Image: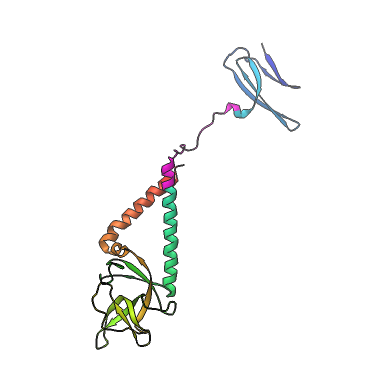
Amino acid sequence: MENKVEVSPGVSIVDSNLGSSRDSHILLTVVENGISMTHYFNAGELQQVSPDHLLEGFETEEPKKNLSSSARIFSKTALFAGYSLAIALFAFSMLSFSGITKARVVLTGSMAPAIHVGDVIITTPIKYKNPKIGDVIAYQAKRFNGAPVGVFSHRIIGGNISTGFIVKGDINKLPDSQRPVSKDILGVVIFVFPYIGNLLTPKALFLLVPTIFGFYLIVDAMRNVE
């Protein structure tokens, strides 16, 4: 015996086994005059459905876990600090390359407590900033025979740039014997980074670089979790 099921005017399904099996499943899509209609036959019943309803959805990747509010704040703060540091380093590199600024690590404690051993001082040439009494200058120290000794960073306490400045370390009892003039002055101190120079030793860098890299991996992992 043949069973005939009409799904739309003029269109029908003819199947001799349609009514004999309760497990029959038929999905038929008919396109007529640009209109698509889908019919689903199951267990003797016919219904018009959307094909999307018969497909089981699946996830293409594991859902991301949500961060706590404190973790999100930490992640954003760390990201902001990282970008700020990168911008500052880039700007300083450009200024150093152009000769506008120069960084020097302080090796003695003669300027304590204003400047300590391990501080990094940022100087700018005297053509960009005229030195005056009270300023700290970096100058080329020389022996009595004119041979260079090193770079001293001491405070101006008197004199002038023409005849020579009287300079002295804040902690020293007496002024320096040399009176630096304009050709001796390498720069005027405009900023001090406390103790940064202590991180530039080989031992400190050996510990610091892996720490920064590990911190970056943690922040990057937190950024991928929303």
Residue 164 located left or right of residue 19: left
Name the residue: 44% across, 71% down.
95
Q: Position of residue 30 (x, y in %)?
A: 70, 27
Give 212 or 11, whichever is nearer the viewer: 212
Tag count: 0
- Which quadrant holds residue 114? bottom left
Q: Looking at the figure, which quarter contains the N terminus?
A: top right
Q: Is residue 22 above or below residue 97?
A: above
Name the residue: 60% across, 27% down.
53
Give 133 or 122, whichever is nearer the viewer: 133
Q: Position of residue 164 (x, y in %)?
A: 34, 85
State the extent of the magenta-drawn residues as a range: 53-74
Residue 10 located left or right of residue 42: right
- Which quadrant holds residue 151? bottom left
Is 56 covered by the magenta stretch?
A: yes
- Which quadrant holds residue 121? bottom left
Q: Is residue 34 above or below residue 103?
A: above
Is 209 covered by the magenta stretch?
A: no
Q: Position of residue 103 (x, y in %)?
A: 36, 70
User: Which color mode does the image show?
Assistant: rainbow
Residue 8 located left or right of residue 111: right
Query: What main secondary structure does the magenta stretch of the protein show?
Result: loop
Residue 53 located left or right of residue 95: right
Q: Position of residue 80 (x, y in %)?
A: 44, 54
Q: Is residue 62 above or below residue 171?
A: above
